[in-house]
Image (spheres, rainbow, N blue to C red):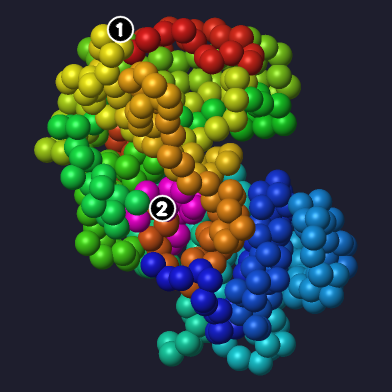
Amino acid sequence: MTSFENMQITPPTIITIFGATGDLSTQKLLPSLFDLFQKRYLPKKFKIVGFSRQEISNKDYREYAKKAIMAKKTSFSEEDLVEFLSHISYAQGFFDKIESYLELLETLKIKEDEIGQCTNKLFYLAVPPVYYKNIFEHLAQSELMKPCSNEAGWTRILVEKPFGNNITTAQELDAILGKLFKEEQVFRIDHYLAKEVLQDILMFRFSNLIFEPLWSKHFIERVELSLFETRGVEGRGAFFDETGALRDVGQNHLLQMLAFVATEDPVELDAQHVRAERARVLKALRPITEETVCETVVRGQYDGYLEVPNIASGSQTETYFKIKAFIDNERWNGVPFYLESGKALTENKAEIKVYFKKTESCLCISEEKSPRQNVLTFRIQPDEGTSVLFWAKKPGLSLEIEPRELSFSYKGSPEVKPLADAYEKVLFDGILGDQMLFTSTEEVSATWHFITPILDLWRDTPLHRYKKGSAGPEIVL
Protein backbone atom coordinates (compact mmCIF):
# COMPACT_ATOMS: atom_id res chain seq x y z
CA MET A 1 0.00 0.00 0.00
CA THR A 2 1.49 3.32 -1.08
CA SER A 3 1.80 6.29 1.26
CA PHE A 4 -0.72 8.94 0.34
CA GLU A 5 1.22 11.75 1.94
CA ASN A 6 4.62 11.30 0.35
CA MET A 7 3.76 10.62 -3.26
CA GLN A 8 3.33 12.62 -6.38
CA ILE A 9 2.47 10.82 -9.58
CA THR A 10 4.80 12.10 -12.28
CA PRO A 11 3.81 10.46 -15.62
CA PRO A 12 1.36 12.67 -17.56
CA THR A 13 -2.23 11.41 -17.29
CA ILE A 14 -5.58 12.08 -18.97
CA ILE A 15 -8.65 11.43 -16.80
CA THR A 16 -11.92 10.96 -18.69
CA ILE A 17 -15.15 11.10 -16.69
CA PHE A 18 -18.12 9.31 -18.25
CA GLY A 19 -21.25 10.93 -16.83
CA ALA A 20 -19.44 14.23 -16.43
CA THR A 21 -22.58 16.23 -15.60
CA GLY A 22 -24.10 13.74 -13.15
CA ASP A 23 -24.37 13.93 -9.38
CA LEU A 24 -21.30 11.79 -8.68
CA SER A 25 -19.10 13.98 -10.85
CA THR A 26 -20.54 17.16 -9.31
CA GLN A 27 -20.65 16.09 -5.68
CA LYS A 28 -17.49 13.97 -5.45
CA LEU A 29 -15.16 13.64 -8.43
CA LEU A 30 -14.53 17.25 -9.46
CA PRO A 31 -14.08 18.48 -5.85
CA SER A 32 -11.82 15.51 -5.03
CA LEU A 33 -9.68 16.04 -8.12
CA PHE A 34 -9.32 19.69 -7.15
CA ASP A 35 -8.27 18.66 -3.64
CA LEU A 36 -5.62 16.34 -5.08
CA PHE A 37 -4.42 19.16 -7.32
CA GLN A 38 -4.17 21.58 -4.40
CA LYS A 39 -2.18 19.04 -2.40
CA ARG A 40 0.08 18.44 -5.42
CA TYR A 41 -0.85 14.76 -5.69
CA LEU A 42 -1.87 14.91 -9.36
CA PRO A 43 0.73 14.55 -12.11
CA LYS A 44 2.37 17.82 -13.12
CA LYS A 45 1.00 17.28 -16.61
CA PHE A 46 -2.63 16.19 -16.63
CA LYS A 47 -5.92 16.73 -18.46
CA ILE A 48 -9.51 16.10 -17.35
CA VAL A 49 -12.05 15.41 -20.07
CA GLY A 50 -15.75 15.36 -19.25
CA PHE A 51 -17.82 13.04 -21.47
CA SER A 52 -21.61 13.17 -21.52
CA ARG A 53 -24.55 13.50 -23.93
CA GLN A 54 -25.31 17.15 -23.12
CA GLU A 55 -24.12 19.75 -25.59
CA ILE A 56 -21.79 21.98 -23.57
CA SER A 57 -18.83 24.09 -24.64
CA ASN A 58 -15.44 23.79 -22.95
CA LYS A 59 -16.00 27.20 -21.39
CA ASP A 60 -19.43 26.24 -20.03
CA TYR A 61 -18.13 22.95 -18.60
CA ARG A 62 -15.31 24.75 -16.82
CA GLU A 63 -17.90 27.05 -15.29
CA TYR A 64 -19.95 23.99 -14.34
CA ALA A 65 -16.88 22.47 -12.66
CA LYS A 66 -16.12 25.76 -10.90
CA LYS A 67 -19.61 25.90 -9.37
CA ALA A 68 -19.37 22.26 -8.29
CA ILE A 69 -16.05 22.88 -6.53
CA MET A 70 -17.11 26.14 -4.89
CA ALA A 71 -20.29 24.50 -3.59
CA LYS A 72 -18.14 21.99 -1.69
CA LYS A 73 -15.08 24.01 -0.74
CA THR A 74 -15.04 26.97 1.63
CA SER A 75 -11.30 27.52 1.64
CA PHE A 76 -9.12 27.38 -1.43
CA SER A 77 -6.65 29.36 -3.48
CA GLU A 78 -8.28 31.32 -6.29
CA GLU A 79 -5.05 30.96 -8.25
CA ASP A 80 -5.15 27.18 -7.83
CA LEU A 81 -8.76 27.04 -8.97
CA VAL A 82 -8.04 29.02 -12.14
CA GLU A 83 -5.04 26.81 -12.90
CA PHE A 84 -7.01 23.61 -12.23
CA LEU A 85 -9.90 24.66 -14.48
CA SER A 86 -7.46 25.31 -17.33
CA HIS A 87 -6.81 21.54 -17.43
CA ILE A 88 -10.50 20.72 -17.98
CA SER A 89 -12.34 20.26 -21.28
CA TYR A 90 -15.53 18.61 -22.50
CA ALA A 91 -16.46 16.07 -25.19
CA GLN A 92 -20.10 15.50 -26.10
CA GLY A 93 -21.15 11.96 -26.99
CA PHE A 94 -23.50 9.04 -26.43
CA PHE A 95 -22.64 5.91 -24.44
CA ASP A 96 -24.33 3.60 -26.96
CA LYS A 97 -22.80 4.97 -30.18
CA ILE A 98 -19.39 3.82 -31.35
CA GLU A 99 -18.98 7.06 -33.32
CA SER A 100 -18.86 9.01 -30.05
CA TYR A 101 -15.97 6.87 -28.83
CA LEU A 102 -14.03 7.34 -32.05
CA GLU A 103 -14.50 11.09 -31.69
CA LEU A 104 -13.34 10.84 -28.07
CA LEU A 105 -10.26 8.93 -29.25
CA GLU A 106 -9.37 11.85 -31.55
CA THR A 107 -9.96 14.31 -28.70
CA LEU A 108 -7.55 12.43 -26.44
CA LYS A 109 -4.93 12.33 -29.20
CA ILE A 110 -5.17 16.12 -29.42
CA LYS A 111 -4.71 16.33 -25.64
CA GLU A 112 -1.62 14.13 -25.90
CA ASP A 113 -0.23 16.41 -28.59
CA GLU A 114 -0.77 19.38 -26.26
CA ILE A 115 1.13 17.58 -23.51
CA GLY A 116 3.80 16.55 -25.98
CA GLN A 117 4.18 12.88 -25.14
CA CYS A 118 2.44 9.53 -24.65
CA THR A 119 0.15 9.68 -21.61
CA ASN A 120 -1.57 7.39 -19.16
CA LYS A 121 -5.36 7.24 -19.56
CA LEU A 122 -7.89 6.73 -16.79
CA PHE A 123 -11.59 6.23 -17.60
CA TYR A 124 -14.00 6.79 -14.71
CA LEU A 125 -17.51 5.37 -15.21
CA ALA A 126 -19.68 7.70 -13.10
CA VAL A 127 -22.80 6.36 -14.79
CA PRO A 128 -25.68 4.01 -13.92
CA PRO A 129 -24.77 0.31 -14.25
CA VAL A 130 -27.19 -0.12 -17.15
CA TYR A 131 -24.57 1.57 -19.37
CA TYR A 132 -21.61 -0.59 -18.31
CA LYS A 133 -21.86 -3.28 -20.98
CA ASN A 134 -22.07 -0.75 -23.85
CA ILE A 135 -19.21 1.32 -22.49
CA PHE A 136 -16.95 -1.70 -21.91
CA GLU A 137 -17.48 -2.98 -25.44
CA HIS A 138 -17.13 0.41 -27.12
CA LEU A 139 -14.00 1.30 -25.16
CA ALA A 140 -12.40 -1.90 -26.46
CA GLN A 141 -13.79 -1.63 -29.98
CA SER A 142 -12.62 1.99 -30.40
CA GLU A 143 -9.15 1.08 -29.03
CA LEU A 144 -9.45 3.80 -26.38
CA MET A 145 -8.14 1.24 -23.88
CA LYS A 146 -5.10 0.50 -26.03
CA PRO A 147 -1.92 2.11 -24.60
CA CYS A 148 -0.30 4.67 -26.87
CA SER A 149 2.93 2.63 -26.91
CA ASN A 150 4.26 -0.70 -25.69
CA GLU A 151 6.89 0.99 -23.53
CA ALA A 152 4.85 3.74 -21.87
CA GLY A 153 1.32 4.74 -21.01
CA TRP A 154 -1.14 2.52 -19.17
CA THR A 155 -4.94 2.53 -19.57
CA ARG A 156 -7.32 1.81 -16.65
CA ILE A 157 -11.05 1.81 -16.07
CA LEU A 158 -12.73 2.69 -12.76
CA VAL A 159 -16.21 1.20 -12.33
CA GLU A 160 -18.70 2.38 -9.70
CA LYS A 161 -20.89 -0.01 -7.72
CA PRO A 162 -23.24 -1.80 -7.95
CA PHE A 163 -21.37 -4.20 -10.20
CA GLY A 164 -24.29 -6.23 -11.55
CA ASN A 165 -27.62 -6.76 -9.78
CA ASN A 166 -27.29 -10.48 -9.00
CA ILE A 167 -24.77 -13.26 -9.43
CA THR A 168 -25.76 -13.87 -13.05
CA THR A 169 -25.40 -10.28 -14.25
CA ALA A 170 -22.19 -9.81 -12.25
CA GLN A 171 -20.68 -12.90 -13.91
CA GLU A 172 -21.79 -11.65 -17.32
CA LEU A 173 -20.10 -8.30 -16.76
CA ASP A 174 -16.96 -10.02 -15.49
CA ALA A 175 -16.92 -12.27 -18.54
CA ILE A 176 -17.03 -9.19 -20.77
CA LEU A 177 -14.29 -7.48 -18.77
CA GLY A 178 -12.16 -10.62 -18.78
CA LYS A 179 -12.50 -10.88 -22.54
CA LEU A 180 -11.77 -7.23 -23.28
CA PHE A 181 -9.31 -6.12 -20.60
CA LYS A 182 -6.65 -7.40 -18.25
CA GLU A 183 -7.51 -7.68 -14.55
CA GLU A 184 -4.87 -5.09 -13.66
CA GLN A 185 -6.71 -2.56 -15.87
CA VAL A 186 -10.02 -2.89 -14.01
CA PHE A 187 -10.68 -1.05 -10.73
CA ARG A 188 -14.08 -1.88 -9.19
CA ILE A 189 -14.91 0.88 -6.75
CA ASP A 190 -16.43 0.52 -3.33
CA HIS A 191 -15.54 3.89 -1.83
CA TYR A 192 -16.13 2.52 1.68
CA LEU A 193 -12.87 0.60 1.32
CA ALA A 194 -11.15 4.00 1.17
CA LYS A 195 -12.68 5.19 4.45
CA GLU A 196 -9.91 5.99 6.92
CA VAL A 197 -11.29 3.97 9.86
CA LEU A 198 -12.01 0.91 7.74
CA GLN A 199 -8.43 0.87 6.48
CA ASP A 200 -7.18 1.34 10.03
CA ILE A 201 -8.86 -1.89 11.19
CA LEU A 202 -6.02 -3.84 9.58
CA MET A 203 -3.40 -1.76 11.38
CA PHE A 204 -5.35 -1.86 14.64
CA ARG A 205 -5.59 -5.63 14.63
CA PHE A 206 -2.27 -6.75 13.25
CA SER A 207 0.05 -4.05 14.61
CA ASN A 208 -1.08 -4.37 18.24
CA LEU A 209 -0.82 -7.52 20.33
CA ILE A 210 -3.53 -6.41 22.75
CA PHE A 211 -6.54 -7.49 20.60
CA GLU A 212 -5.50 -10.03 17.95
CA PRO A 213 -5.15 -12.96 20.44
CA LEU A 214 -8.80 -12.32 21.44
CA TRP A 215 -10.07 -11.96 17.87
CA SER A 216 -12.05 -15.19 17.50
CA LYS A 217 -15.10 -17.20 18.54
CA HIS A 218 -13.43 -17.97 21.87
CA PHE A 219 -13.70 -14.37 23.10
CA ILE A 220 -16.14 -12.54 20.79
CA GLU A 221 -19.88 -12.96 21.24
CA ARG A 222 -21.17 -11.07 18.20
CA VAL A 223 -20.33 -8.34 15.69
CA GLU A 224 -22.75 -5.62 14.57
CA LEU A 225 -22.20 -3.72 11.31
CA SER A 226 -24.50 -0.73 10.81
CA LEU A 227 -25.09 1.83 8.08
CA PHE A 228 -27.96 4.17 8.97
CA GLU A 229 -29.33 7.29 7.27
CA THR A 230 -31.90 9.81 8.47
CA ARG A 231 -32.87 10.85 4.96
CA GLY A 232 -35.24 8.94 2.74
CA VAL A 233 -34.83 8.26 -0.97
CA GLU A 234 -36.04 11.62 -2.24
CA GLY A 235 -34.13 12.67 -5.33
CA ARG A 236 -33.15 9.13 -6.31
CA GLY A 237 -36.51 7.37 -6.26
CA ALA A 238 -36.28 5.69 -9.67
CA PHE A 239 -32.77 4.32 -9.05
CA PHE A 240 -33.50 3.19 -5.50
CA ASP A 241 -36.81 1.53 -6.35
CA GLU A 242 -35.04 -0.54 -8.97
CA THR A 243 -32.08 -1.31 -6.70
CA GLY A 244 -33.27 -1.58 -3.09
CA ALA A 245 -31.24 -1.19 0.10
CA LEU A 246 -29.66 -4.65 -0.01
CA ARG A 247 -28.17 -4.15 -3.46
CA ASP A 248 -27.35 -0.51 -2.76
CA VAL A 249 -25.22 -0.98 0.37
CA GLY A 250 -25.48 -4.61 1.53
CA GLN A 251 -23.75 -6.41 -1.32
CA ASN A 252 -20.85 -3.96 -1.22
CA HIS A 253 -20.33 -1.61 1.76
CA LEU A 254 -21.51 -3.83 4.61
CA LEU A 255 -19.96 -7.04 3.31
CA GLN A 256 -16.64 -5.27 2.77
CA MET A 257 -16.85 -3.94 6.33
CA LEU A 258 -17.40 -7.54 7.46
CA ALA A 259 -14.44 -8.74 5.42
CA PHE A 260 -12.09 -6.20 7.03
CA VAL A 261 -13.16 -7.24 10.53
CA ALA A 262 -13.05 -10.98 9.93
CA THR A 263 -10.03 -11.36 7.64
CA GLU A 264 -6.95 -13.36 8.51
CA ASP A 265 -3.55 -11.70 8.64
CA PRO A 266 -2.58 -10.94 5.02
CA VAL A 267 1.11 -11.03 6.09
CA GLU A 268 2.00 -8.44 3.45
CA LEU A 269 0.25 -5.11 2.93
CA ASP A 270 -0.36 -5.28 -0.79
CA ALA A 271 -3.32 -5.75 -3.13
CA GLN A 272 -2.66 -9.41 -3.89
CA HIS A 273 -2.53 -10.58 -0.28
CA VAL A 274 -5.19 -8.31 1.23
CA ARG A 275 -7.77 -8.95 -1.51
CA ALA A 276 -7.17 -12.70 -1.36
CA GLU A 277 -7.86 -12.75 2.40
CA ARG A 278 -10.99 -10.62 2.03
CA ALA A 279 -12.27 -12.97 -0.66
CA ARG A 280 -11.55 -16.02 1.51
CA VAL A 281 -13.77 -14.61 4.28
CA LEU A 282 -16.60 -13.73 1.90
CA LYS A 283 -16.51 -17.20 0.36
CA ALA A 284 -16.95 -18.68 3.84
CA LEU A 285 -20.28 -16.93 4.49
CA ARG A 286 -22.97 -19.48 5.28
CA PRO A 287 -25.66 -19.48 2.55
CA ILE A 288 -29.12 -18.32 3.57
CA THR A 289 -31.73 -20.81 2.44
CA GLU A 290 -35.50 -21.13 2.26
CA GLU A 291 -35.40 -22.93 5.61
CA THR A 292 -33.35 -20.24 7.38
CA VAL A 293 -34.40 -16.96 5.69
CA CYS A 294 -37.22 -16.08 8.10
CA GLU A 295 -34.98 -16.45 11.15
CA THR A 296 -31.96 -14.69 9.67
CA VAL A 297 -33.38 -11.85 7.53
CA VAL A 298 -35.66 -8.87 8.21
CA ARG A 299 -36.73 -6.40 5.56
CA GLY A 300 -38.72 -3.20 5.94
CA GLN A 301 -40.07 -0.12 4.18
CA TYR A 302 -40.66 3.24 5.82
CA ASP A 303 -44.09 4.86 5.85
CA GLY A 304 -44.33 7.40 3.04
CA TYR A 305 -41.94 5.62 0.68
CA LEU A 306 -44.71 4.94 -1.83
CA GLU A 307 -45.46 8.69 -2.07
CA VAL A 308 -41.92 9.54 -3.19
CA PRO A 309 -41.75 10.62 -6.87
CA ASN A 310 -40.79 7.87 -9.35
CA ILE A 311 -41.64 5.01 -6.96
CA ALA A 312 -43.74 2.26 -8.56
CA SER A 313 -47.29 1.86 -7.27
CA GLY A 314 -47.40 -0.81 -4.55
CA SER A 315 -43.60 -1.20 -4.63
CA GLN A 316 -42.20 -3.95 -2.42
CA THR A 317 -38.66 -2.52 -2.49
CA GLU A 318 -36.96 -2.61 0.90
CA THR A 319 -35.57 0.57 2.47
CA TYR A 320 -34.29 -1.39 5.50
CA PHE A 321 -32.76 -4.79 6.06
CA LYS A 322 -31.07 -6.76 8.81
CA ILE A 323 -29.20 -10.01 8.23
CA LYS A 324 -27.84 -12.45 10.77
CA ALA A 325 -24.83 -13.89 8.97
CA PHE A 326 -22.32 -16.59 9.94
CA ILE A 327 -18.81 -17.28 8.69
CA ASP A 328 -18.09 -20.98 8.53
CA ASN A 329 -14.40 -21.14 9.30
CA GLU A 330 -12.25 -22.07 12.27
CA ARG A 331 -11.91 -18.55 13.64
CA TRP A 332 -15.56 -17.44 13.47
CA ASN A 333 -17.74 -20.55 13.49
CA GLY A 334 -20.90 -19.79 15.51
CA VAL A 335 -20.34 -16.03 15.92
CA PRO A 336 -23.26 -14.00 14.46
CA PHE A 337 -22.45 -10.99 12.29
CA TYR A 338 -25.43 -8.62 12.10
CA LEU A 339 -25.58 -6.52 8.94
CA GLU A 340 -28.12 -3.70 9.28
CA SER A 341 -28.95 -0.71 7.11
CA GLY A 342 -31.89 1.58 6.52
CA LYS A 343 -33.23 4.86 5.24
CA ALA A 344 -35.25 7.39 7.28
CA LEU A 345 -33.88 6.13 10.60
CA THR A 346 -33.06 7.95 13.85
CA GLU A 347 -29.44 8.82 13.07
CA ASN A 348 -26.71 8.97 10.47
CA LYS A 349 -23.90 6.57 11.21
CA ALA A 350 -21.68 3.85 9.83
CA GLU A 351 -19.96 1.77 12.46
CA ILE A 352 -18.77 -1.65 13.53
CA LYS A 353 -19.29 -2.89 17.09
CA VAL A 354 -17.41 -5.93 18.37
CA TYR A 355 -19.00 -7.39 21.51
CA PHE A 356 -16.63 -9.46 23.59
CA LYS A 357 -18.04 -12.23 25.75
CA LYS A 358 -19.21 -11.36 29.25
CA THR A 359 -16.92 -12.01 32.16
CA GLU A 360 -17.60 -15.27 33.98
CA SER A 361 -17.54 -13.48 37.33
CA CYS A 362 -17.52 -9.93 38.61
CA LEU A 363 -15.19 -8.56 41.25
CA CYS A 364 -17.70 -6.05 42.54
CA ILE A 365 -20.13 -5.41 45.38
CA SER A 366 -22.98 -7.86 45.95
CA GLU A 367 -25.76 -5.94 44.17
CA GLU A 368 -23.62 -5.67 41.01
CA LYS A 369 -22.89 -9.35 40.47
CA SER A 370 -23.98 -9.44 36.81
CA PRO A 371 -21.09 -10.11 34.38
CA ARG A 372 -19.59 -7.23 32.42
CA GLN A 373 -19.00 -6.95 28.68
CA ASN A 374 -16.38 -5.02 26.72
CA VAL A 375 -17.35 -3.40 23.41
CA LEU A 376 -14.94 -2.21 20.72
CA THR A 377 -16.40 0.34 18.28
CA PHE A 378 -15.00 1.44 14.93
CA ARG A 379 -16.86 4.62 13.98
CA ILE A 380 -16.54 5.03 10.21
CA GLN A 381 -18.74 8.13 9.96
CA PRO A 382 -19.46 10.67 11.25
CA ASP A 383 -16.91 11.60 13.95
CA GLU A 384 -14.44 8.98 12.73
CA GLY A 385 -12.65 7.15 15.50
CA THR A 386 -12.20 4.04 17.63
CA SER A 387 -13.35 3.43 21.20
CA VAL A 388 -13.31 0.65 23.81
CA LEU A 389 -15.93 0.28 26.53
CA PHE A 390 -14.43 -1.17 29.69
CA TRP A 391 -15.24 -1.28 33.43
CA ALA A 392 -13.45 0.43 36.29
CA LYS A 393 -13.99 1.41 39.91
CA LYS A 394 -15.98 4.57 40.53
CA PRO A 395 -13.96 7.31 42.21
CA GLY A 396 -14.72 7.51 45.90
CA LEU A 397 -14.87 5.35 49.01
CA SER A 398 -17.13 2.59 47.63
CA LEU A 399 -16.12 -0.36 45.46
CA GLU A 400 -18.79 0.19 42.83
CA ILE A 401 -17.75 -0.13 39.20
CA GLU A 402 -18.90 1.84 36.19
CA PRO A 403 -18.40 1.81 32.41
CA ARG A 404 -15.58 3.94 31.03
CA GLU A 405 -14.59 4.65 27.45
CA LEU A 406 -11.10 4.79 26.02
CA SER A 407 -11.33 6.48 22.64
CA PHE A 408 -9.36 7.92 19.77
CA SER A 409 -10.87 10.47 17.39
CA TYR A 410 -9.35 11.33 14.04
CA LYS A 411 -10.64 14.87 14.41
CA GLY A 412 -10.03 15.32 18.11
CA SER A 413 -6.39 16.30 18.28
CA PRO A 414 -4.38 19.03 16.52
CA GLU A 415 -1.60 16.68 15.43
CA VAL A 416 -4.01 14.58 13.32
CA LYS A 417 -4.16 15.72 9.72
CA PRO A 418 -7.59 16.39 8.18
CA LEU A 419 -9.02 13.22 6.68
CA ALA A 420 -8.94 12.91 2.92
CA ASP A 421 -12.29 12.27 1.26
CA ALA A 422 -12.71 8.63 0.26
CA TYR A 423 -12.93 9.64 -3.40
CA GLU A 424 -9.58 11.37 -3.16
CA LYS A 425 -8.09 8.04 -2.13
CA VAL A 426 -10.02 6.19 -4.87
CA LEU A 427 -8.75 8.55 -7.57
CA PHE A 428 -5.21 8.67 -6.20
CA ASP A 429 -4.89 4.88 -6.01
CA GLY A 430 -6.53 4.49 -9.43
CA ILE A 431 -3.92 6.73 -11.00
CA LEU A 432 -1.16 5.10 -8.97
CA GLY A 433 -2.32 1.58 -9.90
CA ASP A 434 -2.76 0.28 -6.34
CA GLN A 435 -5.76 -2.12 -6.36
CA MET A 436 -5.77 -2.98 -2.64
CA LEU A 437 -8.83 -0.84 -1.89
CA PHE A 438 -10.71 -2.00 -4.99
CA THR A 439 -12.74 -5.20 -5.11
CA SER A 440 -11.43 -8.19 -7.00
CA THR A 441 -13.36 -10.54 -9.29
CA GLU A 442 -13.34 -13.13 -6.48
CA GLU A 443 -14.79 -10.70 -3.96
CA VAL A 444 -17.58 -9.53 -6.27
CA SER A 445 -18.49 -13.13 -7.06
CA ALA A 446 -18.49 -14.14 -3.38
CA THR A 447 -20.69 -11.24 -2.28
CA TRP A 448 -23.25 -11.92 -5.00
CA HIS A 449 -23.26 -15.64 -4.18
CA PHE A 450 -24.30 -14.66 -0.66
CA ILE A 451 -26.77 -11.88 -1.57
CA THR A 452 -28.56 -13.35 -4.61
CA PRO A 453 -30.38 -16.14 -2.69
CA ILE A 454 -31.68 -13.52 -0.24
CA LEU A 455 -33.00 -11.41 -3.12
CA ASP A 456 -34.66 -14.49 -4.58
CA LEU A 457 -36.31 -15.24 -1.23
CA TRP A 458 -37.57 -11.67 -0.53
CA ARG A 459 -41.09 -12.63 -1.66
CA ASP A 460 -41.27 -15.25 1.10
CA THR A 461 -40.44 -12.78 3.87
CA PRO A 462 -42.78 -10.11 5.28
CA LEU A 463 -42.18 -6.46 4.36
CA HIS A 464 -42.43 -4.71 7.73
CA ARG A 465 -43.52 -1.07 7.86
CA TYR A 466 -41.71 1.39 10.11
CA LYS A 467 -42.09 5.06 10.90
CA LYS A 468 -39.70 7.67 9.55
CA GLY A 469 -37.28 8.70 12.27
CA SER A 470 -37.57 5.37 14.09
CA ALA A 471 -34.99 2.63 14.62
CA GLY A 472 -36.61 0.46 11.94
CA PRO A 473 -38.87 -2.60 12.33
CA GLU A 474 -39.04 -3.95 15.86
CA ILE A 475 -38.11 -7.49 14.89
CA VAL A 476 -35.49 -9.46 16.81
CA LEU A 477 -33.16 -11.93 15.10
Front residue (pair 121, 405): 405
The 10 Å Cα crowd at callout 1, few under 14, some 14 to 19, many 20 or more, is: few
Q: Residue at x 37, y 18 (%)?
A: 398
Q: Which quarter of the figure has residue 346?
A: top right
Counting residues from the start of the chain, the first of labels 2 and 1 encountered is: 2
Tell me residue 12's x, y (percent).
60, 83
Q: Residue furthest front?
A: 397
Q: Residue at x 31, y 17 (%)?
A: 296
Q: Could you tell me the amino acid type at mark 2? A: Asp
What is the span of residues highlighted in magenta in the rendered image? 186-203
Q: Is residue 93 above or below residue 319?
A: below
Residue 103 in view in this figure? no
Q: Residue at x 50, y 82 (%)?
A: 153
Q: Main secondary structure of the magenta part?
A: helix
Element type at mark 1: helix
Residue 230 in view in this figure? yes
Front residue (pair 271, 203): 203
Residue 468 relative to residue 285: left or right: right
Tell me residue 457's x, y (percent).
35, 17
Q: Residue furthest bottom?
A: 116
Q: Are marks 2 and 1 in contact (CB under 8 Å)?
A: no
Q: Residue at x 87, y 62 (%)?
A: 63
Front residue (pair 28, 407): 407
Tell me residue 103's x, y (percent).
68, 71
The 10 Å Cα crowd at callout 2, few under 14, some 14 to 19, many 20 or more, is: some
- In the rendered image, which residue does mark 2 sit on? 200
- In the rendered image, which residue does mark 1 sit on? 367
Element type at mark 2: helix
Q: Is residue 154 above or below residue 219?
A: below
